[in-house]
Image (spheres, grey):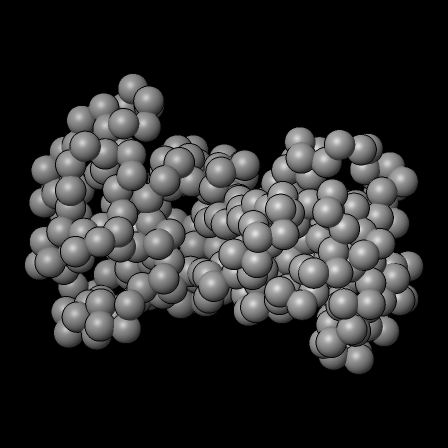
Amino acid sequence: MYRRKFAVLGGDMRNIYLAEQLKKDYQYVEIYGFDKSGKPWAITNPPLDFVLEGARVIIGGIPLLSDNNYLATPLSKEKLSLSEVIEKVPQHALFIAGKIPEQVIKQFSEKNVKCVDIVEREDLAVLNAVPSAEGAIHILLQELPITLLGSRILIVGYGRIGKVLARMLQGFGVEVWAAARKYSDLAWIEAHGLKPVPIHQLGRYVSDMDAIVNTVPALVITKDILEKTRSDCFLLDLASVPGGIDFKAAEAYGLKTKWAMGLPGKIAPLSAGDIIRRTIYNILDEEGGAF
């Protein structure tokens, strides 16, 4: 990997750790938007022109934007407008961020800047399943009044996070049940030594659970299912918007719930930053040195 200039514009602690790791790789790195990060080398924001000048790879946050077309800069007192970045970004650069709106991609392409939405990368998603699963276990240890050993936990959805979380919970001595829609997934659940649950039959199983962890980003744990849930069952939702639990109904039934999105950046920002770094190198490798 030859040396190039990276410009890191905003984002959370994942991106400040990303910048540090890129420096350790002997890359040329300039940052903007981390004056509140607590890092001595980031207490002032240099001029944006200086940060972007000659940059071959520009990295934004996950998500890219906050509101009113400003870049997400939660670790800065200053606001950075998208229009200013588009105006000053070098032509023929590579722009990488998360949840980039289509209109923004179009605006960048008019300047011959290629955009890559990093949250759509399978390699990032698979690696992020590990801190997400560890974060879920951290929450379960805090919220459950019993030990994980001997508990019975239902995971709804057997995707990336569901698979990793199930394996980790088995290591704690949990009786793990997993719900899925596809028969092939149900077969894998059984092959992995778990208890399979067809997702359309959730209502038959929830009354036996100490905790239910949802990973499906669609309403699957409905009012009818919650009605059959034990009053002391803890409900944890790891899914992105719109989530998978009817929180209004859960509150009406007095059930304890938590919606925990974006766990990698909250639980293990250094590891999450390293995952982003590795994914960026994968992208550059795929581009064949074009940037």
- Tell me if residue 199 comes above or below residue 58 in the rendering: below
Do we see residue 127 in this rendering? no
- Tell me if residue 276 comes above or below residue 240 in the rendering: above
Decide which of 121, 283 is in the foreground and name it: 121
Hey, which residue is sitting farthest bottom in the picture? 183
Looking at the rendered image, the quarter that the C terminus falls into is bottom left
Whether residue 197 sits left or right of residue 193 in the image: it is: left
Whether residue 75 sits left or right of residue 282 in the image: it is: left
In the figure, residue 137 lies in which quadrant?
A: top right
Image coords of residue 232 (percent x, y): 74, 43
Image coords of residue 105 (percent x, y): 25, 70
Hey, which residue is sitting farthest top in the picture? 40
In the figure, residue 147 lies in which quadrant?
A: top right
Q: Which residue is drawn at 29% across and 39% down?
A: 74
Image coords of residue 231 (percent x, y): 73, 47
Image coords of residue 127 (percent x, y): 60, 53
- Tell me if residue 88 comes above or below residue 203 in the rendering: above
In the figure, residue 46 lies in which quadrant?
A: top left
Q: Residue at x 84, y 54 (%)?
A: 208
Q: Which residue is drawn at 11% across and 58% down?
A: 83
Whether residue 137 sits left or right of residue 240 in the image: it is: right
Q: Residue at x 69, y 39 (%)?
A: 140
Do we see residue 1 in this rendering? yes
Decide which of 70, 239 is in the foreground and name it: 239
